[in-house]
């Protein structure tokens, strides 16, 4: 564990270290559409949207989606005025739709409680929906020049190595936060925050740290001790629980497929899926499910001669994995009027907010 002297050392070396880091960053910084040109003020809305998109999604994927999103919802007012369904639709391809719902709720709160202007401080930003400690610090530093170092996975790795932190992650997080606070940059805070993240992504890589070309190697304890690639230490991962469900592919004679909307809270909230049984901890037998007369959520949506699509679909969420067995009915379902039913022909699937799980299930059934 880093001693109090590690925090003192961090404060001591901060000015020189940031000087070296910023000089390096000025030479390698990537032009990204949400990044302000050198010396120009940042667009706070663009910074916010990009930071939320970049949680759990890579830069190349965000680059494909960012422009279209900010063109469709050009500022926080436009986003707040939009329907959630439209926001979810524009989020397709980025996954983790919880972020889109959080961003939409955030926009509405900023408009209703803050007159449409984002708070400038870490504390103010932290009160908004969908904003965790990392995003609050990143937006405060990059958009508003607050002297704070945002700690993402890349920065955790750099700090663990720089100060040779032996506490495994995630238990090391409070210690890393103290070191980050001691290193908080007073000069060009936004660039310093991005430079540290960029160093972690491009040089201080997880498996093969590029110590020979690293601009801050002179201050790095792990490099001096020959332990760079061994840090950060990590606690053993817990096994991911398994869940199971059966999805029903119901088609009309014109080819349209029956979908439904998931509940407004919980996993994949408000997203569109095929009618399915309740997700359970044990595998479900298709024969028993079809015959079941139990609750509606654990039986087939219509009476039909079902055929199992060979194989299954496995989808990994953050906290569990789901295995989906797909049953296909004959193409003669009738359109029963119901507000919960959504019928779409395959050439119009694009008009729905389909999460990747539903897309995988459709592909498995030969429909995508
Ligand atoms: Fe990372 Fe090596 Fe640089 Fe240390 S010297 S910060 S381990 S790349």
Image: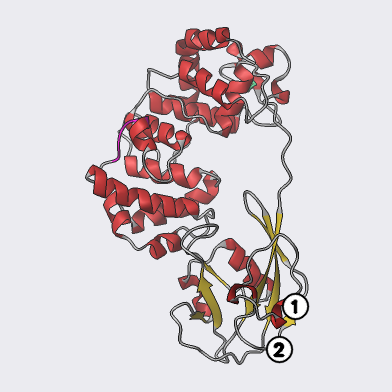
As drawn, 136 above or below 165 = below
Residue 209 - label: none
Q: Secondary structure at mark 1?
A: helix
As drawn, 363 above or below 70 = below
Image quarter of residue 193: top left
Q: Is residue 75 visible?
A: no
Which region is colored magenta?
A: 118-122
Between 337 and 137, the residue placed more toward the observer is: 337
Q: Which x, y percent locates residue 341?
A: 49, 79
Image quarter of residue 31: top left
Q: Is residue 67 visible?
A: yes
Residue on which the image places disc 2: 305
Q: Measuring 50% from the left and 60% from the top, which residue is drawn there?
A: 269
* Residues at discs 2 and 1 in contact (Cβ within 8 Å): no
Q: Which x, y percent locates residue 27?
A: 48, 26
Q: Main secondary structure of the magenta part?
A: loop
Q: Total of numbered circles in the picture? A: 2
Left or right of residue 351: residue 74: left
Between 254 and 336, the residue placed more toward the observer is: 336
Residue on which the image places disc 1: 288
Q: Measuring 53% from the left and 8% from the top, which residue is drawn there?
A: 9
Distance from disc 2 to disc 1, alpha carbons, whole Å, reads 14 Å
Farthest residue toward the left?
Answer: 115
Q: Tell us which disc is closer to us: 2 or 1.
A: 1
Left or right of residue 11: residue 43: left
């Amino acid at each position: 564990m880093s001693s109090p002297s590690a925090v003192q050392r961090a404060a001591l070396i901060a000015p020189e270290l940031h000087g070296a880091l910023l000089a390096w960053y000025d030479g390698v910084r990537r032009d990204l559409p949400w990044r302000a040109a050198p010396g120009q003020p940042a667009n706070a809305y663009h910074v916010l949207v990009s930071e939320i998109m970049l949680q759990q999604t890579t830069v190349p994927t965000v680059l494909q989606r960012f422009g279209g999103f900010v063109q469709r919802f050009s500022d926080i007012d436009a986003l707040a005025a939009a329907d959630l369904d439209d926001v979810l639709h524009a989020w397709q391809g980025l996954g983790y739709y919880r972020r889109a719902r959080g961003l939409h709720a955030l926009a509405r709160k900023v408009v209703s409680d803050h007159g449409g202007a984002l708070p400038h401080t870490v504390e103010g930003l932290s009160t908004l929906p969908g904003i965790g400690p990392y995003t609050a610090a990143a937006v405060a530093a990059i958009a508003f020049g607050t002297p704070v170092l945002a700690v993402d996975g890349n920065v955790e790795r750099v700090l663990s190595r720089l100060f040779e932190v032996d506490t495994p992650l995630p238990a090391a997080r409070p210690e890393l936060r103290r070191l980050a606070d001691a290193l908080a940059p007073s000069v060009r805070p936004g660039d310093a925050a991005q430079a540290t993240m960029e160093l972690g992504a491009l040089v201080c890589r997880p498996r093969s740290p590029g110590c020979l070309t690293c601009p801050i190697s002179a201050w790095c304890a792990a490099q001096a001790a020959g332990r760079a690639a061994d840090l950060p230490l990590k606690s053993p991962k817990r096994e991911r629980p398994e869940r199971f469900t059966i999805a029903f592919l119901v088609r009309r004679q014109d080819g349209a497929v029956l979908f439904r909307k998931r509940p407004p809270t919980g996993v994949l909230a408000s997203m569109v899926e095929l009618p399915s049984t309740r997700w359970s901890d044990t595998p479900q037998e298709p024969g028993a499910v079809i015959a079941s007369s139990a609750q509606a959520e654990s039986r087939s949506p219509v009476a039909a001669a079902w055929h199992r699509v060979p194989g299954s679909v496995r989808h990994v969420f953050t906290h569990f994995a789901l295995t989906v067995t797909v049953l296909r009915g004959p193409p003669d379902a009738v359109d029963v009027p119901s507000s919960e039913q959504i019928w779409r022909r395959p050439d119009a699937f694009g008009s729905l907010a389909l999460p990747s799980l539903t897309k995988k299930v459709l592909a498995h059934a030969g429909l995508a």
